[in-house]
Amino acid sequence: MAVNKRLVIFLLIVIGLSILSIVYPYLKPTGQVTQVNYEREQAILARVIDGDTIELESGDKVRLLGINTPEKNMPYSNESKMFLQQFMNKTLELERDREDLDKYSRKLRYIFFEDRFLNLEIVERGLANSYMTSDLKYERNFINAEAQARLLGVGIWTKSSDYCSNCIELKKLNPINETFILINKCDFNCNLSGWFVKDAGRNALYLSIIFSNSEKLFQSKKNTWNNDGDEFFLFDNSGKLVFYYKY
């Protein structure tokens, strides 16, 4: 009986090691995501809704992964939309990542035309900021593309030349209560009519005058900044970047 028991234990160990050898390549430490490579699908571009949303000939809507372009009527919104319109009625290749659909039932995809990665190219041209890239397949590509666009000062990263652009600074941002304080360090008033701040997504808040050598508290009326990390853009009334802060 003892011999049989040892044999059973031995067989269980062998079976366990066999199973482990199969699943081991897919195991990663806690907190890391296993990357799955999905096959690309082909589709014809039928309509461009905006710079990061398209409609296919099938009727499916697609939200471009890894990017966020300016909202309608914002600076560079038309430019990002026009960039995609040059591929109208052409056959694109679509590639998914971890999630298939967003909460609006749009497909979440990377889109390619021939040897061009269009999501990435939009960021490289400064027509979008990288957005929600954590653990995406092309996360590092988006981060590098945005860094290069910022360095070159193209598109949304074009620096403001407004005379108040050197006066206004961010003193404090409190994402928990949705407030921020701006300082005017100059000896003259700065009328910030038309200036706006925004987060990494689509939320924007327009500003008003800040008197000389003073500070002003602003309150967002909606949930604008994420408590666990976000971005803070300040643009002048022509859509040029005054400053950028990421936390």
Image: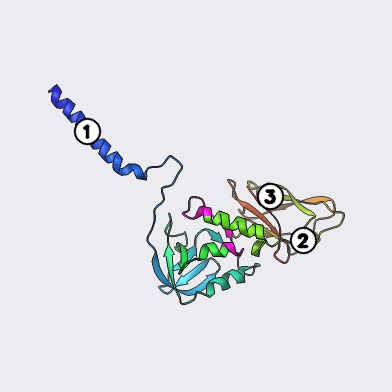
Work out whether residue 222 or residue 246 is closer to the camera in this orientation and state it.
246
User: Disc 1, disc 2: CB below 8 Å?
Assistant: no
- In-image side of 15 versus 94 (left or right): left
Which numbered dot is residue 179? 3
- The stretch in magenta equals 123-140
User: Disc 3, disc 1: CB below 8 Å?
Assistant: no
Q: Residues within 10 Å of mark 3 (few under 14, many from 20)?
A: some
Q: Residue at x 12, y 23 (%)?
A: 1
Q: Does the magenta-highlighted stretch encompass residue 219?
A: no
User: What is the CA distance from the residue labelled 3 to the residue labelled 1?
Assistant: 61 Å
Q: Is residue 200 among the parts visible in the rendering?
A: no
- Identify the secondary structure beneath mark 2: loop
Residue farthest right in this picture: 187
Q: Residues within 10 Å of mark 1 (few under 14, many from 20)?
A: few
Mark 3 or 2: in front is 2
Position of residue 204 measured from the top left corner of the image (x, y, whole percent): 65, 60
- Identify the secondary structure beneath mark 3: strand
Position of residue 113 measured from the top left corner of the image (x, y, whole percent): 47, 69
Q: Quadrant of residue 7?
A: top left
Residue highlighted by disc 2: 192
Q: Main secondary structure of the magenta part?
A: loop
User: What is the CA distance from the residue labelled 3 to the residue labelled 2?
Assistant: 17 Å
Residue highlighted by disc 1: 12
